[in-house]
Amino acid sequence: MAERCEVLRVENVTVAYNGRVALRGATFTVLGGERVAVVGPNGAGKSTLFKAIVGLLPLESGRVEVFGCDPRREPASVGYVPQREDVDLTFPVTVHDVVMMGRIRHIGWLRRPSRRDREAVRRALEQVGLADLAGRPLGELSGGQVQRAFIARALAQEAPLLLMDEPFAGVDAASEEAILHLLDRLRERRVTVLLATHDLQMAAEWSDRVLLLNGEVIAYGPPADVLCPDALRRVYGGQLTLWEHERGTFILGDGHCSGGRR
Ligand code: ADP
């Protein structure tokens, strides 16, 4: 089937900040239409991995390919929803401007947006429930609304691969609901999604594969294989309370996940 082609290849990728390695030798591939949850404790390298994939950070070594090409040369192929704390809310742009940025590669430099571009922006804003706030400065939105604006930017980009960095962190219930609904819509459209999350229950229930990170790839595979007591203890140590039961591993609350069961 066409959607099972390889969309993302990360090969032996190492990333460092000022000579300090944050991610070492990451290797994995993602197939078309897959939903991959990227999990690991704070500082595990989830954001670093995403920034390396979209070309925001240089690689110390290794390579990244999206549909067989360097994503820095084909940036339209990867949509990126940054973590909220990475967004500069003082930058004077409206919600509409932010979403239109997703169309830049379609519009081309120094050209005006076409009707198709404006329509894509309108649709994306509607999908995330922000149509009424299009003219608002970004800095006046709530955390959840900012997150939705960046998701709309990625939707307007119409990228076949989407990276979402902790989209549920600090969002209100309405935004959480809207984001979950969108994830379902993306599934229908066979968009390949990598989502960084602290929520192990969500990772277990939502994803086709889990990438467990802790400065390097600890495990990668179906949730039932990766979210097993051994691997989780290795990564989270005493921060997680696990309760093994014949029906699965129960993950009891901690500072890093909402608790739950697989
Ligand atoms: P996660 O997203 O899993 O919480 P990060 O990718 O943000 O992890 O961080 C991985 C490691 O890289 C951490 O040790 C963090 O302190 C370090 N790091 C992240 N961003 C920077 C930066 N801009 N400068 C220096 N070190 C950084």
Image (spheres, helix red, strand yellow):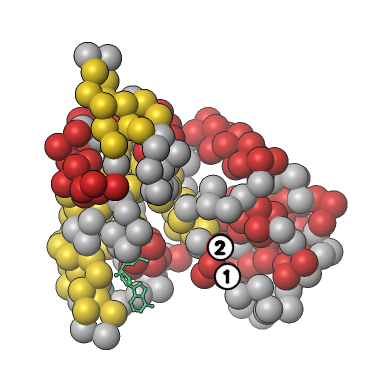
Q: Position of residue 106 (x, y in %)?
A: 60, 63
Asked which secondary structure carries label 1, the reply is: loop
At 37% from the left edge and 71% from the top edge, which residue is drawn?
55
Label 1 packing within 10 angstroms: few (<14), some (14-19), many (20+): some
Please state the horizontal and vertical placement of residue 186, each as a whole percent of the image.
53, 38
Q: Quadrant of ligand 1?
A: bottom left
Residue at disc 2, secondary structure:
helix
Q: Which one is in front, 170 or 124?
A: 170
**Depth order, front residue of 259/46:** 259
Q: Does the residue tagged 1 have its C-beta within 8 Å of any atom of ligand 1?
A: no
Residue drawn at x 61%, y 62% as measured from the top left: 102
Task: Characterize the local packing of mark 2: few (<14), some (14-19) or many (20 or more) Cα atoms within 10 angstroms.
Answer: many
Check residue 87 in the rendering and tell me which mark sits there, or answer none. 1
Q: Residue at x 55, y 32 (%)?
A: 184
Left or right, residue 114 beside residue 191? right
Determine which quarter of the picture holds residue 59: bottom left
Q: Tell me where residue 58 sits by quadrant.
A: bottom left
Distance Cα–Cα, label 1 vs label 2: 5 Å
- Mark 2 = which residue? 84
Which quadrant holds residue 260? top left
Q: Are marks 1 and 2 in contact (CB under 8 Å)?
A: yes
Q: How far from the left and from the top, in percent, is residue 248?
A: 26, 20
The residue lying toward the viewer, choosing from 188 and 46, is: 46
Q: Give 29 or 19, whichever is nearer the viewer.
A: 19
- Give the vertical position of 122 relative to 71 (above or below): above
Q: Position of residue 10 (x, y in %)?
A: 24, 57
Residue sitting at 38 percent across and 62 percent down? 47
Task: State left or right for residue 145 relative to residue 133.
Answer: left
- Is any atom of residue 69 visible in this view? no
